[in-house]
Amino acid sequence: MSAIPLADDVLDADVAVVPVAEVAEMLNVAQNKVRQMLRDGHLIAVRRDGDLMIPADFLRDGGVIKGLAGTITVLSDAGFTRTEMLRWLFAEDESLPGTTPINALRTSHGTEVKRRAQAMAF
């Protein structure tokens, strides 16, 4: 089994993060499934206080927010590291609905977020 790719914890201290065990409960899947989602690039995790944590903003209504996995794939294809992806997803951008890419995804503006991610690749 391959190692789980992690991002450096570049998140502000006030950004809520959730341990893998709680994410598994929220998604109603086994913890191994969550780890596989991290390996497959559907989620990004950081290590905080020694524990593997996932930003709470990645989750809603018992699932992963729509468009997150596709956005991570686009950013990965553009050569972004997991740390750079996390930094970009949580960076302020007043021109986006929701003021950050992650908030834009949470408010159903995934097409605009992916468009911007694709533009950064060129």
Image (spheres, rainbow, N blue to C red):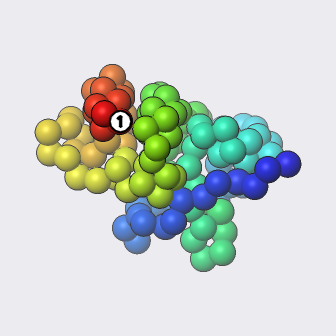
List the single residue furthest toward the top. 111
Q: Position of residue 24 (x, y in %)?
A: 71, 46
Q: Position of residue 96 (x, y in %)?
A: 20, 37
59 and 46: which is toward the camera: 46
Labels in figure, total:
1
Mark 1: secondary structure: loop
Point 43% across, 38% down: residue: 78
Would residue 30 be visible to someone looking at this image? yes
List the single residue furthest toward the left. 95
Amino acid at dot 1 = Ala
5 and 106: which is toward the camera: 5
Q: Quadrant of the C terminus?
A: top left
Point 73% across, 48% down: residue: 35
Point 46% across, 44% down: residue: 79
Q: Circle 1 is placed at which residue position?
A: 121
Q: Position of residue 1 (x, y in %)?
A: 85, 48
